[in-house]
């Protein structure tokens, strides 16, 4: 078996052990080296997918926000995502215009290194906190409850 694949499998094992040791409920997708889990937040649920990518030698956490951006709100969300990302030190939001989805994305490399169990709860905590801080504002923009001007005024 290729060295990158072995390293990815070991990282996936560490990820699962970390979740087990923290008593977290999650679903394993062993063939794909992916786990999925959900967290509660103050306003909207937060779903996380953590993938161990052998080829890239990275762990990628994605949290899809639970709404779809209509085409008429594309520019507003694109602007909002840029403004938010400018403030973030760890991770970023991605807006996919082709399907209207918004994700929070965080990655860390295990190239020539070994990731410890303590990293994964930190990643989930950062993702959950960041999504919880911004998902309601982005949702309000999508639903027309907040204008981009109001959003910018609050953020700048």
Image (cartoon, grey):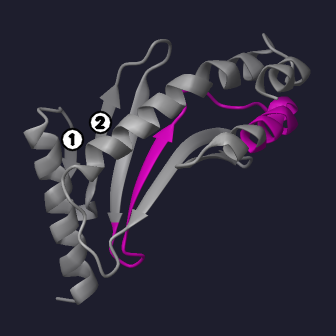
Residue 98 image offset from top left, x and y in percent? 72, 49
Residue, x 19% and y 48% (percent of image)? 28
Question: Any mark on residue 85, and which?
Answer: none
Q: Position of residue 134 (x, y in %)?
A: 61, 26
| Local crowd size for mark 2, using a 10 Å CA cut-off: few (<14), some (14–19), many (≥20) | some
- Vertical placement of residue 28 versus 65, above or below: below
Decide if residue 35 is in sight here: no
Is any atom of residue 72 visible in this view?
Answer: yes
Mark 2 = which residue? Answer: 37
Residue at 17% x, 42% y is 19
In the drawing, does residue 128 fall left or right of residue 14?
Answer: right
- Outermost residue, right direction? 149
Find out whether residue 6 is within the magenta segment.
no
- Looking at the image, residue 7 sits to the left or right of residue 99; the answer is left
- Relative height, residue 124 to residue 96 (above, below): above
| For residue 56, above or below residue 135 | below
**Which region of the structure is painted magenta?**
53-82
Q: Count the marks: how many?
A: 2
- Where residue 32 sits, quadrant-wise, is bottom left
Q: Please name whichever residue, 26 or 20, is drawn nearer the observer in this view of the structure.
A: 20
Determine which residue is flagged by label 1: 27
Q: CA distance from mark 2 to mark 1?
A: 6 Å
| Contact flag, marks 2 and 1 (Cβ < 8 Å) | yes
Residue at 57% across / 42% down in the picture?
Answer: 103
Q: Secondary structure at mark 1?
A: strand
């Amino acid at each position: 078996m290729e060295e990158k694949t072995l390293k990815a499998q070991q990282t996936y094992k560490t990820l699962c052990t970390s979740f087990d040791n923290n008593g977290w409920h999650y679903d394993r997708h062993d063939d794909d080296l992916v786990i999925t889990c959900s967290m509660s937040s103050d306003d909207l649920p937060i779903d996380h997918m953590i993938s161990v990518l052998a080829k890239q030698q990275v762990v990628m956490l994605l949290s899809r926000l639970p709404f779809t951006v209509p085409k008429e709100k594309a520019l507003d969300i694109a602007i909002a995502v840029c403004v938010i990302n400018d403030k973030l030190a760890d991770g970023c939001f991605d807006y996919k215009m082709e399907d209207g989805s918004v994700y929070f994305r965080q990655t860390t490399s295990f190239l020539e290194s070994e990731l410890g169990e303590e990293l994964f709860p930190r990643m989930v905590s950062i993702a959950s906190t960041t999504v919880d801080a911004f998902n309601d504002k982005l949702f309000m923009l999508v639903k027309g409850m907040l204008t981009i001007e109001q959003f910018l005024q609050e953020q700048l």
